[in-house]
Image: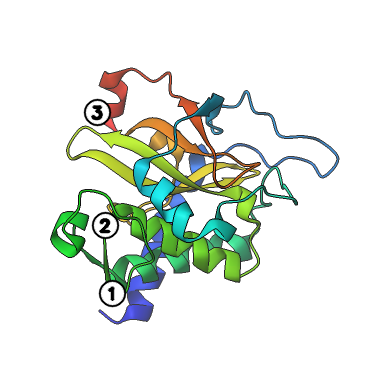
């Protein structure tokens, strides 16, 4: 199967995920954050050790967001960009643990062909920022997978809900349609701060997804 055919196939499958999205917000209204398509947060929390070290070496990438955007309007073009970036980087990066690659448990960095889950997320965030996406809508997120334990993904806040770009799943889904227990994510107001995520879903529901 050619890469183009694979992308078209992935795009067609990904349309299934759209059925659980929130209705688009009108231009004159704010987001309805009570909609479960948006992950609720409960305040500042500790920064993951790997991200803290990343910020020490790249302080300009962990600063206050001076141009905060509540959410990206999910147009067809934007949706296609998400699909393309997620599919391409998932295929381009070979999954290798930090322990295998760097000899330490946690080392967050931009991957050079190889990387752990957080490196995929960092690469996707970087690529979308280059394409003009507002950094305040691109949030590295930490969660727990019932199968593999700790995991990291990129959460993209759109006017249709919080979408998850994941190196373990090809489909882009709304956060609450993924089989993970969400713990915390970057703050929208400051890329160097993190906030707790309120995930009220019972374990049985998460396991069934």
Query: According to the image, label 1 marks what residue?
Result: 113
Viewer-side residue, 101 vs 39: 101
Quarter that holds the N terminus: bottom left
Pick out the residue farthest to the right.
28
Crowd rating for badge 1 (residues with CA inside 10 Å; few <14, some 14–19, many 20+): few
Place residue 206 in its image quadrant: top left
Pick out the residue farthest to the front.
56
Q: Position of residue 85 (x, y in %)?
A: 46, 67
Q: Position of residue 115 (x, y in %)?
A: 27, 63
Query: According to the image, label 3 marks what residue?
Result: 207
Query: Mark 2: which secondary structure?
Result: loop
The Cα–Cα distance between marks 3 and 2, rounded to whole angstroms, is: 23 Å
Viewer-side residue, 110 vs 91: 110
Query: According to the image, label 2 marks what residue?
Result: 116
User: In the image, is residue 180 above or below residue 1?
Assistant: above
Horizontal side of residue 53 vs 167, given as left or right:
right
Nearest-to-viewer mark from 3 and 2: 2
Whichever of callouts 1 and 3 sits on the residue coming sooner in the sequence is 1
Is residue 179 among what the camera can see? no
Horizontal side of residue 186 vs 171, given as left or right:
right
The Cα–Cα distance between marks 1 and 3, rounded to whole angstroms, is: 31 Å
Horizontal side of residue 147 vs 6, given as left or right:
left
């Amino acid at each position: 199967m050619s890469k183009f055919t694979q992308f078209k196939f992935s795009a067609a499958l990904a349309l299934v995920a759209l059925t659980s999205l929130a209705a688009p917000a009108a231009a004159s209204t704010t987001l309805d954050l009570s909609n479960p398509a948006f992950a609720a947060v409960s305040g500042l929390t500790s920064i993951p050790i790997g991200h803290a070290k990343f910020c020490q070496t790249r302080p300009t990438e962990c600063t206050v967001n001076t141009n905060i955007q509540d959410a990206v309007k999910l147009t067809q073009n934007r949706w296609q960009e998400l699909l393309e970036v997620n599919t391409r980087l998932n295929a381009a990066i070979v999954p290798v643990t930090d322990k295998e690659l760097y000899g330490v448990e946690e080392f967050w960095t931009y991957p050079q062909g190889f990387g752990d889950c957080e490196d995929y997320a960092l690469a996707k965030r970087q690529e979308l920022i280059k394409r003009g996406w507002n950094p305040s809508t691109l949030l590295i997120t930490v969660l727990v997978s019932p199968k593999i334990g700790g995991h990291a993904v990129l959460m993209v806040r759109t006017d249709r809900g919080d979408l998850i770009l994941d190196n373990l799943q090809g489909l882009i889904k709304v956060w609450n349609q993924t089989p993970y227990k969400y713990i915390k994510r970057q703050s929208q107001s400051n890329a160097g701060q993190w906030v707790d995520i309120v995930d009220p879903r019972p374990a049985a529901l998460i396991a069934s997804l």
